[in-house]
Image (spheres, helix red, strand yellow):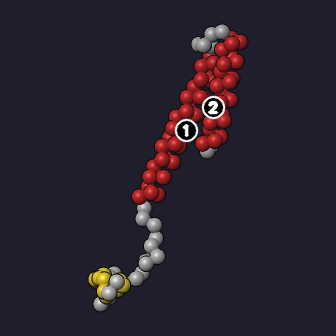
Amino acid sequence: MDTPQLIHRLQLLQRRLCEMADDLGNLTDPEIVAVSEEADRLIVQLQRLRKQEAEDRKRAAETPSASVLTGSKPAEEIGEQGGAFFLKNP
């Protein structure tokens, strides 16, 4: 399940828990406990997914992008001559 699906499912469970609590009046009822445990599992799953997404974004930001100059010879010297830049390669 992806993040939006998990959030939607959690919202449905939250509504169901509220309705069940109103109807049953006892938060320790086995049915309420079962739904609450399902919500707990989804919350943990969502936290893990978000952590992984954050790590992926961080890793992508740290990875240098390909340069236009990839494959070109490294410059030995860059200098300025008469207002124009020149590049010397071996």
Instruction: Inspect this view and state whether residue 31 appears.
Output: no
Residue 26 spot, x, y in % from top left: 63, 10
State which quadrant residue 65 falls in: bottom left
Q: Secondary structure at mark 2?
A: helix
Q: CA distance from mark 1 to mark 2?
A: 10 Å
Q: Which of the 4 image quarters holds residue 11?
A: top right
- Percent position of residue 21, x then y: 66, 14
- Label 1 CA crowd tier, 10 Å (few <14, some 14–19, many 20+): many
The x, y position of residue 63, in whole percent, is: 42, 61
Mark 1 and mark 2 lie on one chain; the one further toward the N terminus is 2
**Residue 71 visible in rendering:** yes
> Residue, x 60% and y 19% (percent of image)?
33
For the residue pair 30 and 88, the one nearer the viewer reads as: 88
Q: Is residue 81 above or below residue 53?
A: below
Which label was assigned to residue 34? none
Left or right of residue 68: residue 79: left
Q: In the rendering, which numbered label is found on residue 46?
A: 1
Q: Residues within 10 Å of mark 2 (few under 14, many from 20)?
A: some
Residue at the front extreme, as displayed: 82
- List the residue tagged with mark 2: 10
- Tell me which residue sits at (65%, 40%) in the image: 5
Query: Of the residues shown, which amino acid type is indicated by label 2?
Result: Leu
Q: Quadrant of the N terminus?
A: top right
Quadrant of image for the C terminus: bottom left
Estimate the x, y position of residue 30 in percent, counting from the top left. Answer: 62, 16
Could you tell me the amino acid type at mark 1? Answer: Leu
Q: Is residue 70 above or below residue 87?
A: above
Contact (Cβ within 8 Å) of mark 1 with mark 2: yes
